[in-house]
Amino acid sequence: MSDPDLFDRARRSRRPAVLTLVFAGVLATGAATGALSDGRGQEGNPTAAPAGSAPVADRRAVTEAAARALADGKSATEAARRAVSRSGDRWGAVYSEGEYAEFEQSLDGEYTGVGLWARRDVDGRVEVARVQHRGPAERAGIRKGDRLTSIDGRPVDGLPVTDVVALLRGDAPGGDAPAAGTSVVLGLERGARAWHETLRRARLTTDSVTVQPLGDRAGDGVLVRVAAFTKGTGAQVREAVRQAPQGAGILLDLRGNSGGLVAEATATASAFLDGGLVATYDVEGEQHALHAARGGDVHRPLVTMVDGGTMSAAELLTGALQDRGRAVVVGTRTFGKGSVQMPSKLPDGSVAELTVGHYRTPAGHSLDGRGITPDLEAEDAVQKRAETVLSGLGSPS
């Protein structure tokens, strides 16, 4: 097998046999709403999937099911979706050509949506996790913390978040992604207030990296929030670290980061490491490794914030920084998605993203189904506690 294509995500549908490390299922969830979606492996068997991890799909079986359906005059896409469902691959997905093109654009930092992030709160209800600046949701007055009760008249409580995302996008099974300008009606609650808001989807660009000072003094530290690992994220983080005032520590916020391009997560790790191992992963039994580039800032104090919405590529980065003693991790246990997907183009032009392996942190921990436990667990006032930790780490030497 050739080395994985870690960068050119847009060429994947034309080169189905080449692996691009994208944690697709979770990322597609984030991208559709406007953000874009462990313990040790079995000892003595480094290629075995860890207990509780996602099954590895049979790519040939899915492709053959699609081909048979097409020969019989039936929907190859629907046949492939049924085959993926039977495989037990929880992260497997089948996209129409239009959906896949939209997904690839989201990895380039563009998407069609309303500019909000959705998540399930502690009570199991769907709430707005974040609102994109100047997006349709913000212009309509929707705020972080608002409850999302319905989409186009359909109640969302009890639905998987992926289904909520599909409703927000307006996706039809086997159909193309909706165009900018199409409308969606959201049912919302804020305290005792309940109302409906009609939004028009728009073509938006993601603000994958935002930077702001933590205080008035130069040495108070810098907050670097990474919402998703889209193309160019690593370079933006590296530049933010380079421009941070001398003596300032970095508070790296990965909360709600649903993943993205592993090449960009590795490039982000390179901002804080001077080479060395970032992660290992297997693809159908063949072992590979990801390494940071040399020249990262290894002296600046670093604290990373995570939560249950920190997934996949964001977990890969967190695991590397934690295992190598580069960062103190603060927050709550991460989601636990450590699987690798590979695209396969189907006979009708649709694309199946199937799980083919799993990754491990530098210390050999597999995160799939278990996640990362923070060094300091905190559910409330997370940023305040993280800032306290950062201030206690001292200035770089």
Image (cartoon, grey):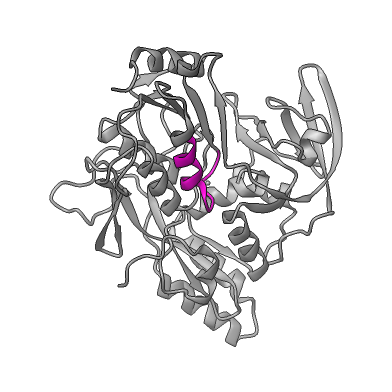
Classify 343 as above or below 32.
below
Q: Is residue 169 left or right of residue 15?
A: right
In the picture, the quarter occupied by the C terminus is top left
Q: Total label count?
A: 0
Q: Residue 44 or 80: which is nearer the viewer?
A: 44
Q: Among all residues in the image, which is located at the extreme bottom?
A: 71
* Picture quadrant of residue 209: top right
In the image, residue 228 lies in the stretch drawn in magenta: yes
* Picture quadrant of residue 370: top left
In the picture, the quarter occupied by the N terminus is bottom left
Residue 297 pos. (x, y %)? 34, 35
Mark yes or no: residue 149 visible.
Answer: yes
Q: Residue 171 or 19: which is nearer the viewer?
A: 19
Classify 30 as above or below 8.
above
**x 40%, y 63%: residue:** 57
Residue 325 pos. (x, y %)? 26, 30
In the image, residue 383 lies in the stretch drawn in magenta: no
Residue 173 pos. (x, y %)? 68, 62
Q: Is residue 180 left or right of residue 207?
A: right
Mark yes or no: residue 253 visible.
Answer: no
**x 35%, y 37%: residue:** 272
Residue 145 pos. (x, y %)? 68, 25
Q: Among all residues in the image, which is located at the extreme left?
A: 44
Range drawn in magenta:
227-240
